[in-house]
Image (tube, helix red, strand yellow):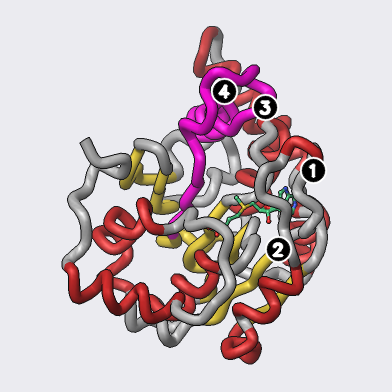
Amino acid sequence: MYKTGRPPLDPDFQATIDRWFAGKDFSVNFVKSHVPIWHSILAPRREEPLSILEIGCFEGRSTIFFLEYFSNSRITCIDSFDGGVEPAKNPYPAYPARFDSNLSAYKDRITEIRARSSTGLEMLRTHDERFDLIYVDGSHQRIEVLLDSVGAWFLLKVGGILIWDDYKLMRHLPSAERPMDAIDLFLRAFGGCYVMLHHKYQVIVRKSAEWPDNPQPAKRGKRGALWRLRRVIDSVVTRP
Ligand SMILES: C[S@@+](CC[C@H](N)C(=O)[O-])C[C@H]1O[C@@H](n2cnc3c(N)ncnc32)[C@H](O)[C@@H]1O
């Protein structure tokens, strides 16, 4: 079974992608296994002048992929380049100099925000930025993934696509140290506002609606709890 649920790419397209990465300096490839599903979902929008946001760009491989795949796009990258909340445990220390040198040919299409995601997302919201495609691939801590998801959601245009990486990462770890429960909580809270496109190692949705201005009054049981959760998130994230 393929990790992404899709067969490998056409060899010619794979060779093209290999050329995009040739001559660059990478220590690991977090992108390769995701390309077949990305291609199957994103291909219809390839020629559009998309505005893309990436949380967690590391050495820039996914950044280069998006810039090459969407040749008319621009990308905003948020990365603290400090390895997240537990840098000592992180087997992949981030080197901003490697990102800079790998992306040097694309400088005029990149806005780089070298900050924690909470700070970067707040900056973008303050400037009323909106994106067509958002890739959430930063922290793996449950609370940070939840905050990144909510922060990203309000920057995503209706019709835009949100991709979470690492939904099934390290399921032996406590819930608080991996993304799954944050993503599940987000999906339940925002039910009715998205169309599910893919739900395996990555989760991919298309935003179909903003939150209603006047949510239904809280009901008893599970649905009532979800409305209350929405209201709590709403009070944390004040829309501009
Ligand atoms: C898994 S890597 C991203 C991989 C990259 N998207 C790729 O496919 O090549 C995660 C990155 O997120 C960054 N990061 C982790 N927690 C963060 C946070 N709270 N705010 C900003 N960046 C964070 C790390 O510095 C690291 O570079």
**Quarter-of-image position of residue 46:** bottom left
Q: Earlier in the sequence, mark 3 or mark 4?
A: 3
Mark 4: secondary structure:
helix
**Quarter-of-image position of residue 9:** bottom left
Of the two numbered discs 1 and 2 in the rendering, the one whose residue sits closer to the viewer: 1
Classify mark 2 as within 8 Å of ligand 1 or not, answering yes or no: yes
Of the two numbered discs 3 and 1 in the rendering, the one whose residue sits closer to the viewer: 1
**How far is disc 1 from disc 2 in space, using C-alphas?**
17 Å
Residue range highlighted in magenta? 161-188
Image marks 1 and 2: residues in contact by CB distance under 8 Å = no
**Quarter-of-image position of residue 232:** top right
Left/right of residue 72 with respect to residue 152 in the rendered view:
left
Which residue lies under the disc numbered 2?
78
| Residue 82 higher or lower than 13, as above or below | above
Q: Earlier in the sequence, mark 2 or mark 3?
A: 2
Classify mark 1 as within 8 Å of ligand 1 or not, answering yes or no: no
Which residue lies under the disc numbered 4?
226
Left/right of residue 226 with respect to residue 43 in the rendered view:
right
Residue appearing at x 46%, y 31% in the figure = 168
Left/right of residue 48 with respect to residue 121 in the rendered view:
left
Residue 177 circle label: 3
Image marks 1 and 4: residues in contact by CB distance under 8 Å = no
Rendered location of residue 238, percent (x, y): 76, 49
Q: Earlier in the sequence, mark 3 or mark 1?
A: 1
